[in-house]
Amino acid sequence: MSNTIGSDPVPKPSAQARGNAGARVTLSPLGGAGTSVLVDTGHARVLVDCGASPALAAFDASTLDAVVLTHAHPQHADGLAALAHNGFTGVLIATPYTLRMADIGLRDALLTRQENEGPAAAAERAATRTGPGPALPDDDPAAIAATVAALGIGREFGDPAVIAPGVSCTLHRAGHALGSAWVHFDLGAAGTLAVSGDLGRHGHPLLRHPEPFTHADTVLVEAAYGEGRRAASDDRDHLAHTVFTTLDQGGTVLVPAGPVDHIATVLFELARLRRVGCLPDGVTVCFDGPTGLESVGVWRDALLARDPELHDAVLDAGFGALDVGVLTEVRGARPGAHPSGSGGGIVVAGPHHGDGGRAARHLRELLPDPRNAVLLQGRSPVGTAAHALARGATEVRIGKDIVPVRAEIARLPGMTTHADAGEIIEWLGRGTEPNMTYVVHGSPGARVALRDRIRNTLDWNAEILAGDAVLGR
């Protein structure tokens, strides 16, 4: 299949064979914390997002015509390598910024895994690999970049992409991450489908609000914060106090965050602290890992281009919006220490949930010392180290070790880029009522809560997408 999307696509043979299937569309969840949904129109098979999961790892990706990425956060994009391994040769549709961030995130995940495994374990895994495809592209950073470049089709907001005859999609600004999108599908005789992806919150420090929803026959909506409103909090004051106090007493501040999580929002807040004197000149902010500065470079490109995704005030500030003074990157920093060799610094290390990777190594060394602090943004997945810390645990399991918690744990629940339940309802309510709204992506409780709120507040038909759903007119 040609990786050219436009008004005259060249369908794969499998798509041509399915061309007379009729105006029925099947939606099938494929795991990945509820983020991966297969849309089978009979004319085309399209996967929306691809969070890694056992179901995705076993999926025959050679039958796919396209993958549409709403954004590059790991829960939505870290299954790309498995898809390529399992025969995916279709097109990868996303905004240009999302494609760049997906490449960065996948390479960082590989390098983190290699650091955790060591060469012997990596060689053993390679020797015992099974599956229909060649060596996984995530065995080699260069192969990851080549895979994304070969399959990726960058699409700007509002620019329709024709996937197969009678099947197209258009990306719209979601305001959650740089390049993030919600997706509107035109499915021909089967009607239209809107997929929210992750919507951004009101008051995002860098990005504009999501473009409004108008209408679709069917809607898939995320429920990451479906259980209620994000607390109106004094997070900025808490952040300022924690950073200033920790640095003043010679401690280290750890920010668990991967390169495509929310690094830019962390830098924005630290830059603000620097402007008001809470982050002294000369304090180094260091990324422990090889891709942090590359991620920041994508944001700087957006600032330089005066990308309309960004707030006017951010564009007017230019590079100053993210200027924290001394910003560096060190791979393999000594766990628990600032890479400069002394205390009194800020380390950013992923993953954001603190399980495994560089963040876990730093947590193991930092948590027992009361001079140190750990900043936890938004919510963390249940069962992770970050979730335990946020709930006030006095000790946590890091790998095989039980680690006492004496460092300050600064919970910053309002510093999330996710829309809360009220904002999701507001986004939906600006459009006309669909035939059905399916709730996806979120904890079981969050999905139930958002489903009920849609029913009670909007008086719409709403269900949780727990199995196959058949659409048609």
Image (spheres, rainbow, N blue to C red):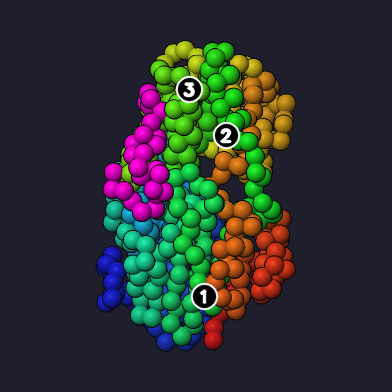
Question: Is residue 430 rendered magenta in the image?
Answer: no
Residue 127: which quarter of the image? top left
456 and 341: which is toward the camera: 456
Say whether residue 306 is magenta: yes
Identified at 36% across, 39% down, the residue is 317
User: Horizontal placement of 466 versus 194: left or right?
Assistant: right
Q: Amino acid at mark 1?
A: Ala
Does residue 312 sit above or below 19 in this rendering? above
On the picture, is 74 further left or further right than 467? left
Q: Residue at x 29, y 44 (%)?
A: 304
Q: Amino acid at mark 2?
A: Arg
Task: Work out whether mark 3 precedes mark 2 in sequence or the reverse, and give the earlier one.
Answer: 2
Which residue matches tag 2?
236
> Residues in magenta?
304-328
- Mark 3 vs mark 1: which is more N-terminal? 1
Quarter containing the N terminus:
bottom left
* SS under mark 3: loop
Q: Position of residue 148 (x, y in %)?
A: 33, 53
Q: Is residue 346 visible?
A: no
Look at the numbered disc 1 and give the secondary structure of its residue.
loop
Residue carrying label 3 = 277
Mark earlier in primary sequence (1, 2): 1
Establish if 323 lies above or below 7: above
x 62%, y 63%: residue: 425
Q: Describe residue 146's horizontal placement relative to residue 254 as left or right.
A: left
Residue type at mark 3: give it. Answer: Gly
Nearest the eye: 145 or 350? 350
**Does 420 sit above or below residue 460?**
above
Disc assigned to residue 216: 1
Instruction: State which quadrant residue 465 falls in.
Output: bottom right
State which quarter of the image contains the C terminus. bottom right
